[in-house]
């Protein structure tokens, strides 16, 4: 893959942050470890966590927007929003639009 991928694309991927906080939202790939402050999350958990995060009912301090766990439709919870709608298998890519206090979904 490294031979086929342009160098500037590889450089971009190598320098991506594993998470970002914007306003009331915390964005990451998989989720967060409950009980650990958002600014102290481990990259491994941000990329791979499942059950401990998905089963948590606690307030994380921000609404966590994530994927990594496929669902038929976006899953809105008080503490998290899962937007993984299995684009690789379903052909349906989902995007969460956040405008002020309004949340809406765009989908292919």
Image (spheres, rainbow, N blue to C red):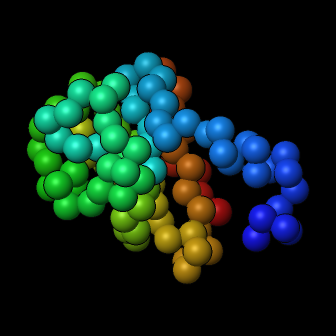
Viewer-closest of 8 and 83: 8
Q: Quadrant of residue 41?
A: top left
| Residue at the extreme bottom of the image, as rendered | 89
Residue in the image at 30% along x and 56% along y: 49
**Quarter occupied by the C terminus:** bottom right
**Quarter occupied by the N terminus:** bottom right
Coordinates of residue 78 in the picture (x, y in percent): 22, 39
Residue in the image at 73% along x and 43% along y: 12
Left or right of residue 61, residue 3 in this image: right
Q: Is residue 87 visible?
A: yes
Viewer-closest of 69 and 16: 16
Q: In this figure, what is the number of numbered marks?
A: 0
Coordinates of residue 69 in the picture (x, y in percent): 37, 64
Figure check: 2 above or below 59: below
Residue in the image at 40% along x and 29% along y: 25
Q: Quadrant of residue 26?
A: top left
Viewer-closest of 65 and 30: 30
Residue in the image at 47% along x and 36% along y: 19
Figure check: 73 above or below 100: below
Left or right of residue 9, residue 67 in this image: left
Q: Quadrant of residue 38?
A: top left
């Amino acid at each position: 893959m490294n031979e086929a991928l342009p160098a500037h694309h590889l450089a971009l991927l190598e320098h991506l942050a594993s998470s970002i906080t914007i306003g009331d939202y915390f964005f990451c790939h998989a989720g967060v470890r409950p009980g650990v402050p958002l600014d102290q999350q481990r990259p491994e958990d941000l990329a791979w966590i499942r059950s401990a995060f998905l089963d948590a009912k606690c307030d994380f301090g921000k609404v966590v927007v994530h994927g990594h766990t496929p669902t038929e439709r976006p899953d809105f919870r008080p503490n998290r929003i899962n937007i993984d709608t299995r684009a690789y298998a379903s052909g349906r890519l989902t995007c969460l639009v956040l405008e002020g206090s309004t949340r809406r979904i765009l989908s292919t």
